Image (tube, helix red, strand yellow):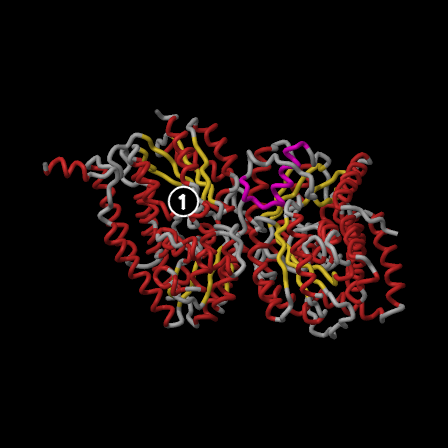
Amino acid sequence: MIAVTEQKKEKAYRLLKSSALLQQIMFRYMMEGQIASEEGNLAWVTSGFPVEIPVAMNIGISYPEQYGAVVGSQRMGPELCGFAEGLGYSQELCSYARSSIGSVKHPDQSPLGGLPTPQALLACNNICGTVLRWYDTVSELTGAPVFLLDTPPLEGEQPEHHRDYVRKGLDKLVDFLEQVFGKPLADERMQEVALYSTEAVGLWTQCLEACKAKPSPLNCADRFLTMAPIVSLRGTDYVKDFYVSLLAEVKERISNGVGAIKEEKIRLLWDNIPPWFTIFRFFNGLAKRGVVFPADTYTHAWTGSIEGDNLFDSVVSIYSNVYLNKGLDAKIDKMCQLIQNYDLDGFIMFSVRSCKRYSLGQLVSKELVTERTGVPGVVIEGDMVDSRLFNEAQIQMRVDALLEMFA
Amino acid sequence: MVIRMSYSRVVEQSDQAIRELTEAGEQILGYIYPHFPLEIAMAHGLLPSLVRTSPSAGGGYESSLQTFACSLTRNIFSQRASGHLTTFSGIVFSGNTCDSLQNVGEVWRKRFPDDKTFRLTYPAAIPSESSVTFLAEELRKFSVAIDSEFKMPFSEELFKDAVALISEIRESLQMLYAARVLSPKLLEYSTLSSLITGFLTAPTTSVLDNVLEIRSSTMEDLEMQVDRDLVSELQNAFLRKDLMDIGKFDESISIRLLLVGGMIETNALSEFLKSVPNFSEDMIILDLLSYGFKTAFTPSISLVGDPFENSARAILGSLGEPTQEGLSDRVRFLKEILSKLSINGLIICEQSFCDPDEFEAPSLARAAEDLQVPSVRLPIDPELSDRVRLEGRIQTFLETLM
């Protein structure tokens, strides 16, 4: 009787033991952000911002995009986006931005009481053009000044004048931060922060690459959750501890032949941000049908290491060459590489209405990726935070159609 | 005399003009983003022409773009997918201006691989020496790409001619803009719009002749009413983006409207507004539209020194777009205009699914509210698919101002 109960309890997906440590680290990150804000020492940064520079200047950091994920996962998206819409921001705009604007306006009605109030807003447009306009709006609401690190999108190799332009932008960033926070940048501290960042990114990359194993030790939702420190805590000393722990668990799973899901039958690639409000339901639902996602294009975005004789040059190169700052060809190449390297059977592209930079081009990419790799894919449409823009039945139907191809 | 035409007729006529120029042996280079280096294209012997949206464009984009791509890019893509836009020898897409335009440029290359397409990347940061240097290098690269594709090298002589021609057209348009502010009844807004349309279609000497003719008659009429120096003063203030030294204008006209927004053609807008009951063209005091004021008020290019650097400096000297850094400067300038020109109604046009327009609009509306100027927002697409509702909105807005 006991054995039967235990068998019944065994889920189609497996929880990570490292989750407990992740919660501790993220709690610390939130507390540090709160304290920094109270001390007049907090900057909000975009996910593709060279955060190592403000961190090296001992400035506290908060990530509104990550907060958007929290809003989404707590299913508060429609309510907070609605606050922004009440201020005149169209429902056609990015839901990270709308929920962020809504939470600034109504922190008391937002998860965690909203993000701590910033003293500066640091935007880098290597992930999209929206971040500048979003931060401009937050600036109007909070009075915090905006700094834009302009990293023009690339076509192939980065030309010298692009490098020079971004490099000058970094110099202006240091001047801006010195002016706002009254803190200088010390070379030794920058080297230390760069080393922490590189070590963490190295460990994270190993975790990602371990998913080439069969069965895959991590599923999509696992990676989307465990990427939080690499997004928000690059350059800090304690982030490494988490990734050492995660990598050990991943290796342990591989050596024991234990996968992220109970029975791995189909291996797929995920493209784009996930629907945060249904992330577990969506991926675990597929896990029950034997579908695992050993790779995705999103969590692989944080892979560059800041190193070499001239750290700022390295920063220029890494942050200009992020996935979303390259052309369609680079995106198609990346998807094909992941499909081949991770031995994937197909792919799901989430067309996120909020994110034009990521999503426009997917209809063409889908055809070209299939043509090059021979594996089928499907495009589903919805949103990452605003669940009003997510038609579950329609999405299910399209995913079913893809899965039938593997039957 | 300028003949009034409907916007569809204007589009048809500009298509016809382009066809005729092509038949006459001109190679036409299409562009979409308004701050295009016209003079550099002309220095290569190419004729730059705005790729115009079509109010009658049907579908065609659906297998390549999602519905949330901005309405302007969907419209242009649909035209191409339906076999139109063939008169263009090449099309230039902008980079780093908005995510839609950039991605659509890439999708275009995949879908229409035989088309000659170019990308010109703009700096998004507040203009500075480093952004001038960056854009200058992009323009140089663009020039090399044109040469390589069309086998038409950059000619200093053609560049000088182009600078002279474009400067004269722009300065005349600037003067007409300033004159209209002083006396809106002197020149119908639709007439000014038609001149701009001609300039955007093909900056030729015949366009210049047309502009000069209207300028001459308008200035003659104006001189009977106000001091000509006032026109120059206002024109220069607009170019400086600073109206601090300008005195406040009278309020003899009860409704004084300012049109703001992004990449919406002045002709399309004026034709739409004219269809609204109780609307009169002289209510429009000024527009700050990308294909209007911002097209006209681009500073002239200096002929001393490097042509690419000078072109970059001129392009970055125009009033910024919502795609760029500098919202607070744009809001400040808007407030100056609202206040100094005694504007009492603001019409904010937003291209549907255009992130830059839709993000900027609430800030513009708040700026107007600060000055107790009523505003109305118009979500517009090139097909004017929501025309009846938009008309109703404007009509109600005008009634509140009366």
- Circle 1 SS class: loop
Task: Give the total number of marks visible in the rendering.
Answer: 1
Using residue A301 as the reference point, say whether residue A253 is left or right of it.
left
Residue B200 location, x and y as percent? Answer: 74, 48
Question: Where is mark 1, residue-wise?
Answer: A298
Give the residue at x 80% y 40%: B17
> Looking at the image, can residue A188 be seen?
no
Pinpoint the chain carrying mark 1. A
Residue B254 location, x and y as percent? Answer: 75, 68
Classed neighbour count for the residue bearing mark 1: other residues with Cα under 10 Å, few (<14), some (14–19), many (≥20): some
> Foreground residue, B85 or B276?
B276
Dividing the picture into quadrants, the one containing residue B259 is bottom right
Using residue A180 as the reference point, say whether residue A203 is left or right of it.
left
Residue B291 location, x and y as percent? Answer: 70, 52
Q: Quadrant of the C terminus of chain A?
A: top left
Residue A9 location, x and y as percent? Answer: 19, 40
- The stretch drawn in magenta includes residue A78: no
Give the residue at x 80% y 70%: B230
> Looking at the image, can residue B376 be seen?
yes
Q: Is residue A86 above or below residue B380?
A: below
Q: Residue furthest left?
A: A1
Dividing the picture into quadrants, the one containing residue A212 is top left
Give the residue at x 51% y 46%: A357
> Foreground residue, B266 or A62?
B266
- The stretch drawn in magenta includes residue B81: yes
What is the magenta range? B66-83
Q: Quadrant of the N terminus of chain A?
A: top left
Residue kind at label 1, given as amino acid type = Tyr
Q: Main secondary structure of the magenta part?
A: helix
